[in-house]
Image (cartoon, helix red, strand yellow):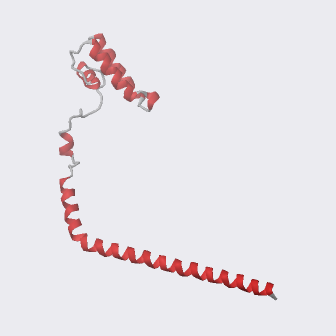
Amino acid sequence: MESKRQQSSTASTAAVSTNYLKASSLILAGLGVAAVGFAGKHLVRRMPQMTTKINEALKNLPKFDAESMANSKYYKGGFEPKMSKREAALILGVNPSANKLKIKDAHKKIMLLNHPDRGGSPYLAAKINEAKDFLDSGK
């Protein structure tokens, strides 16, 4: 008889703990919904102020149109069919009358960034080498 009583007691304890877990889950879910509601209420009240700040920030962003791009510090246009002294100097970022040491240093810096073994373009690497050779030869 006592074994049935123990089984009954164990079953009722399991049922109580299951009901307790369900109730606590419902309470936590309710608290979560309440928190989301309060946060939403706060955001809705702050929205007019936020929209004016966002609009001001968007107006202050730099423009990316053709006019602003035309004033860029970078050289516009592609490569010339035949390398010139001016183009070679622009590629290496040196003065056309730079000495061999400056040309060598500029070539080294640019090739470290654009070498094909490090993900750079083989075409750009060839143009950089061509520019160095052109300026070194002094044509």
Vertical side of 107 occupied by 55: above or below: below
Position of residue 114 measured from the top left corner of the image (x, y, whole percent): 38, 29
Quadrant location, the N terminus? bottom right
Q: Quadrant of residue 71?
A: top left
Quadrant location, the C terminus? top left
User: Which residue is rendered at x = 23% and y = 66% of the image?
Assistant: 50
- Does residue 72 show up? yes
Residue sitting farthest toward the right: 1
User: Which residue is rendered at x = 25% and y = 70% of the image?
Assistant: 47
- Does residue 139 show up? no
Position of residue 65 measured from the top left corner of the image (x, y, whole percent): 21, 48
User: Which residue is rendered at x = 54% and y = 81% of the image?
Assistant: 23
Q: Nearer the viewer, residue 116 or 43?
A: 43
Say whether residue 116 is left or right of residue 51: right
Vertical side of 138 occupied by 68: above or below: below
Q: Nearer the viewer, residue 11 or 87?
A: 11
Vertical side of 85 occupied by 116: above or below: below
Residue sitting farthest toward the bottom: 1
Q: Nearer the viewer, residue 37 or 9?
A: 9
Q: Quadrant of residue 30?
A: bottom left
Say whether residue 29 is left or right of residue 13: left
Position of residue 116 measured from the top left corner of the image (x, y, whole percent): 44, 28
